[in-house]
Image (cartoon, helix red, strand yellow):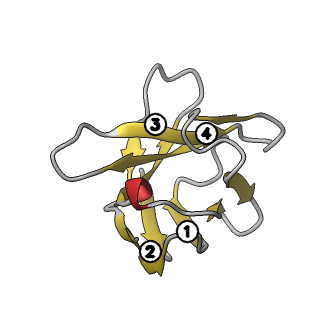
């Protein structure tokens, strides 16, 4: 079992920055891929970014490319999402997720952290 806890959300003006953190505990010795998703009010959850266990491979949704950066520190069992040039449309609850090796889907999810970008 892996417990994921997000932090770092808040209210920021358009053009500003935030850094989200996702701390993992529990079965953290297993190599797993991780990702960020978000869900805006009235919308479906959508993929934001993903990172491999080693951190060498990263993937981004087109809507955040060039503005967001995903990273991880395995020594601290923590993943990050640096969000720059924030836009009002980035407003959502952001969730982190972890996938066990060879898993076809994300197995563990955090409770989410609210990000609100004012115009």
Judging depth in this view, the residue of 117 and 74 nearest the camera is: 117
Q: Gap between marks 1 and 4, in whole Å? A: 14 Å
Work out whether 65 lies above or below 71: above
In terms of secondary structure, where does tag 1 sit?
strand
Q: Position of residue 59 (x, y in %)?
A: 67, 33
Which residue is denoted by mark 3 in the rendering? Answer: 47
Q: Earlier in the sequence, mark 4 or mark 2?
A: 2
Q: Are marks 3 and 4 in contact (CB under 8 Å)?
A: yes
Q: Earlier in the sequence, mark 2 or mark 1?
A: 2
In terms of secondary structure, where does tag 4 sit?
strand
In terms of secondary structure, where does tag 2 sit?
loop
Work out whether 29 lies above or below 57: below
Judging depth in this view, the residue of 77 and 34 nearest the camera is: 34
Mark 3 residue crowding within 10 angstroms, few (<14) / some (14–19) / many (20+) = some
Q: Are marks 4 and 2 in contact (CB under 8 Å)?
A: no
Which residue is denoted by mark 2 in the rendering? Answer: 9
Q: Gap between marks 4 and 2, in whole Å? A: 18 Å
Mark 4 residue crowding within 10 angstroms, few (<14) / some (14–19) / many (20+) = many
Q: Gap between marks 3 and 4, in whole Å? A: 8 Å
Q: Gap between marks 2 and 3, in whole Å? A: 17 Å
Which residue is denoted by mark 1 in the rendering? Answer: 20
Q: Gap between marks 3 and 1, in whole Å? A: 15 Å
Foreground mark, 3 or 4, reads: 3
């Amino acid at each position: 079992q892996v417990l994921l806890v997000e932090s770092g959300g808040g209210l920021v003006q358009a053009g500003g920055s935030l850094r989200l953190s996702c701390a993992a505990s529990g079965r953290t010795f297993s190599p797993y891929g991780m990702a960020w998703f978000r869900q805006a009010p009235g919308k479906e959850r959508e993929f934001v970014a993903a990172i491999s266990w080693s951190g060498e491979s990263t993937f981004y949704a087109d809507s955040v490319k060039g503005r967001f950066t995903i990273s991880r520190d395995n020594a601290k069992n923590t993943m990050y999402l640096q969000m720059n040039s924030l836009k009002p449309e980035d407003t959502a609850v952001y969730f982190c997720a972890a996938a066990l090796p060879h898993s076809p889907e994300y197995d563990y999810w955090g409770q989410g952290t609210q990000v609100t970008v004012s115009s």
